[in-house]
Image (spheres, rainbow, N blue to C red):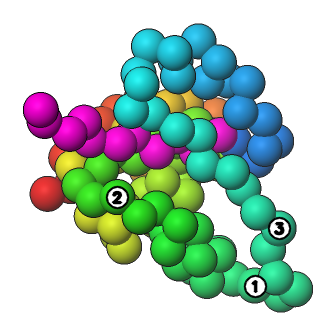
């Protein structure tokens, strides 16, 4: 029996995981990452480190929608997933405003 590689799904800033309601039943190895409250004056980098520490399985895949995609890219620098999927998100601060980006980046 081979183990399935987990897929960690990051919703947008609304913290609403309903966006994945139709996807999760199709991917039994997928789970939605729950956002937690940031510490007072916590940087995004520090928050991402704490979030990445909760993703215990490697190898893995990481996917994010909107702001979740931005966090997924930052998490990918720490956990080194097999791939990072961006859904309606941006690759970096240089992407033009209002341009949705759909892509998968192979990380390893």
> In the displayed structure, would residue 52 be above or below residue 25?
below
- Which residue is painted at 41% across and 64% down in the image? 56
Judge left or right: residue 84 versus residue 53: left
Mark 3 or 2: the one toward you:
2
- Horizontal and vertical percent position of residue 10: 58, 44
Q: What stretch is highlighted in magenta?
A: 1-11
Mark 3 and mark 2 lie on one chain; the one further toward the N terminus is: 3
Magenta stretch: dominant SS?
loop
Reading the image, the residue beneath label 1 is: 42
Mark 3 and mark 1 lie on one chain; the one further toward the N terminus is: 3
Tell which of 12 and 9 is nearer to you: 9
Judge left or right: residue 100 versus residue 28: right
Reading the image, the residue beneath label 2 is: 57
Q: Quick check: marks 2 and 1 in contact, CB under 8 Å?
A: no
Q: Would residue 41 be seen by someone viewing this image from the given angle?
A: yes
Q: In which quarter of the image is the C terminus?
A: bottom left
User: How many C-alpha atoms fall within 10 Å of the one at disc 1: few (<14), some, or many (≥20)?
Assistant: few
User: How many C-alpha atoms fall within 10 Å of the one at disc 3: few (<14), some, or many (≥20)?
Assistant: few
Q: What element carries label 1?
A: loop
Mark 3 or 1: the one toward you:
3
Mark 2 to mark 1 CA distance (whole Å): 25 Å
Judge left or right: residue 5 versus residue 66: left
> In the displayed structure, would residue 27 be above or below residue 10?
above
Q: Is mark 2 on a helix, strand or loop?
A: loop
């Amino acid at each position: 029996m081979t183990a399935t590689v987990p897929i960690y799904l990051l919703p947008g800033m609304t913290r609403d995981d309903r966006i994945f309601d139709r996807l999760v039943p199709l991917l039994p190895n997928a789970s939605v990452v729950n956002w937690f409250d940031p510490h007072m004056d916590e940087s995004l980098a520090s928050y991402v480190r704490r979030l990445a520490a909760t993703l215990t399985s490697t190898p893995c895949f990481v996917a994010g929608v909107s702001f979740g995609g931005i966090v997924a890219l930052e998490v990918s620098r720490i956990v080194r997933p097999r791939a990072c999927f961006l859904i309606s998100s941006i690759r970096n601060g240089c992407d033009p405003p209002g341009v949705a980006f759909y892509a998968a980046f192979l990380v390893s």
